[in-house]
Image (spheres, helix red, strand yellow):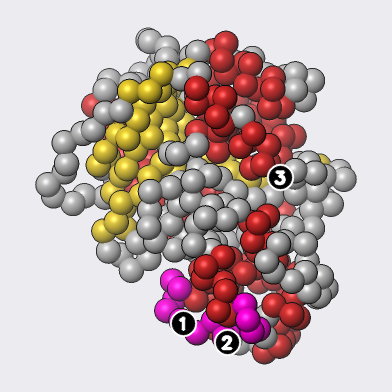
């Protein structure tokens, strides 16, 4: 089965041709402040009819039975955030505004799955943020951060590094809130978080940071982490317990990102020859994970060093096992309602993540965590059912407030 990214990209050129493009630039910001829009790269309007046709083509009417409500306008932007060292940097993203006057909109932040090709993100290819377009048509102000290292960012993507990715998303939410306030776009105070695969992991990284560190600034209404690797150490142990793995790019991506962000800078400690030399070029932003898989062995013992595999299998202390544990998202209890959705035949991100996360979050005080299991669903076939469950879940928590919230 084709990946969700592959399916989306089939329709990108058709979709872009149907939109009116008006490029606008803002005045540069003289003083640095996180959560500020630096530049509006482009803005486009999309009619409800165009969106309905797109969804029909993308998903099929029988699989995606939802009623869209609004035309939308979306913006591709650069905004200010920080990198993994805390230094200022610009990141890119896409946000969507419903084209409906007189309403007060909930805000939703949506987080994409694993993406290694820089251009396959919302700021450049809007269909890569298909869920944000859909949410806009359902009456949400939708935020979709490209993440560092993707889109217009020149950094190495900090793949599955919780705090860095949470900062990137949160600063984009801040920027969009300010934009909405300046443009008199009324928000009702609701804040939803959602994402699939890596996006499911990112969802909970953002949720955790908001509730444990930024509770005076943000109040999460509900979140829907779908097919996320919340237990990174457990996931790595599960995968390496079997030498064969169909998505070696995922593990190689994570190892390369950790080595770069944490400054290990010696890939020969982790990868067998010749992959310790070729990995940086494979992850230079020009290839998809499917294309990278074609350049990597399916046997992990041929890709990774025995010392790395042994450390993960046995859970012994090492650079890698330490950061896997530190970046796992188990040791806390979300207070806002959470819906976990995961297919129980998922071999890329094992279903056990859903069970372990629910158990740990509830042990740490969470009282409203639901788990929906997609029976027989693999990592790709579960995408559309998961999105439908998340939409229904969020709709149950949307506020009826009719007072604009100024930020």
- Regarding residue 367, the answer to whether it shows in the image is no
Reading the image, the residue beneath label 3 is 3
User: In what quadrant of the picture does the N terminus appear?
Assistant: top right
Q: Residue at x 74, y 80 (%)?
A: 302
| Residue 99 x, y percent position in the rendering | 42, 15
* In the rendered image, the vertical position of residue 52 relative to residue 130, given as above or below: above
Is residue 64 within the magenta segment?
no
The rendered magenta stretch, by its main secondary structure, is classed as loop
**Which disc is residue 162 wearing?**
none
Dot 1 falls on a residue whose secondary structure is loop
| Residue 402 x, y percent position in the rendering | 40, 16
- Horizontal side of 103 relative to 137 (left or right) equals left
Q: Earlier in the sequence, mark 1 or mark 3?
A: 3
- Regarding residue 153, the answer to whether it shows in the image is yes
Dot 2 falls on a residue whose secondary structure is helix
Q: Please, which residue is most extreme toward the right here?
A: 376
User: In what quadrant of the picture does the C terminus appear?
Assistant: top left
Q: Residue at x 38, y 45 (%)?
A: 92
Reading the image, the residue beneath label 2 is 269
- The crowd level at tag 1 (other Cα within 10 Å; few <14, some 14-19, many 20+) is few
Q: Which residue range is magenta in the image? A: 260-275
Is residue 272 within the magenta segment?
yes
Q: CA distance from mark 2 to mark 3?
A: 31 Å
Q: CA distance from mark 1 to mark 2?
A: 9 Å
């Amino acid at each position: 089965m084709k990946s969700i990214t592959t399916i989306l990209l089939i329709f990108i050129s058709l979709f872009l041709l149907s939109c009116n493009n008006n490029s606008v630039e803002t005045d540069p910001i003289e003083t640095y402040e996180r959560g500020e829009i630096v530049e509006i790269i482009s803005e486009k309007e999309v009619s409800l009819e165009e969106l309905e046709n797109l969804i029909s083509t993308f998903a099929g009417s029988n699989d995606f039975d939802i009623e869209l409500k609004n035309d939308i306008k979306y913006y591709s932007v650069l905004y200010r955030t920080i990198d993994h060292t805390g230094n200022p940097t610009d990141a890119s993203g896409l946000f969507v505004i419903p084209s409906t006057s007189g309403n007060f909109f909930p805000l939703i932040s949506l987080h994409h799955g694993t993406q290694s090709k820089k251009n396959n993100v919302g700021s450049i290819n809007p269909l890569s943020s298909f869920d944000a377009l859909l949410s806009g048509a359902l009456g949400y102000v939708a935020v979709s951060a490209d993440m560092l290292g993707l889109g217009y960012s020149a950094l190495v993507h900090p793949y599955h590094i919780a705090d860095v990715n949470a900062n990137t998303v949160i600063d984009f939410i801040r920027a969009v809130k300010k934009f909405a306030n300046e443009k008199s776009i009324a928000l009702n105070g609701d804040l939803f978080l959602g994402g699939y695969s890596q996006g499911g992991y990112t969802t909970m990284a953002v949720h955790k940071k908001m509730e444990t560190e930024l509770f005076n600034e943000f109040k999460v209404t509900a979140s829907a982490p779908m097919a996320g690797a919340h237990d990174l150490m457990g996931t790595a142990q599960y995968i390496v317990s079997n030498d064969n793995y169909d998505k070696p790019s995922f593990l190689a991506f994570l190892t390369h990102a950790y080595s770069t962000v944490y400054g290990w800078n010696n890939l020969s400690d982790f990868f067998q020859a010749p992959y310790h030399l070729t990995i940086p070029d494979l992850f230079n932003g020009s290839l998809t994970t499917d294309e990278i898989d074609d350049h990597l062995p399916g046997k992990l013992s041929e890709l990774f060093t025995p010392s790395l595999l042994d450390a993960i299998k046995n859970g012994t202390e090492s650079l890698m096992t330490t950061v896997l544990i530190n970046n796992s998202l188990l040791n806390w209890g979300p207070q806002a309602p959470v819906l976990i959705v995961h297919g129980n035949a998922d071999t890329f991100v094992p279903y056990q993540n859903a069970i372990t996360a629910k158990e740990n979050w509830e042990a740490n005080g969470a009282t409203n965590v639901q788990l929906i299991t997609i029976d027989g669903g693999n990592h790709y076939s579960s995408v559309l059912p998961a999105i439908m469950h998340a939409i229904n879940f969020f709709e149950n928590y949307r506020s009826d407030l009719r007072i604009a919230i100024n930020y």
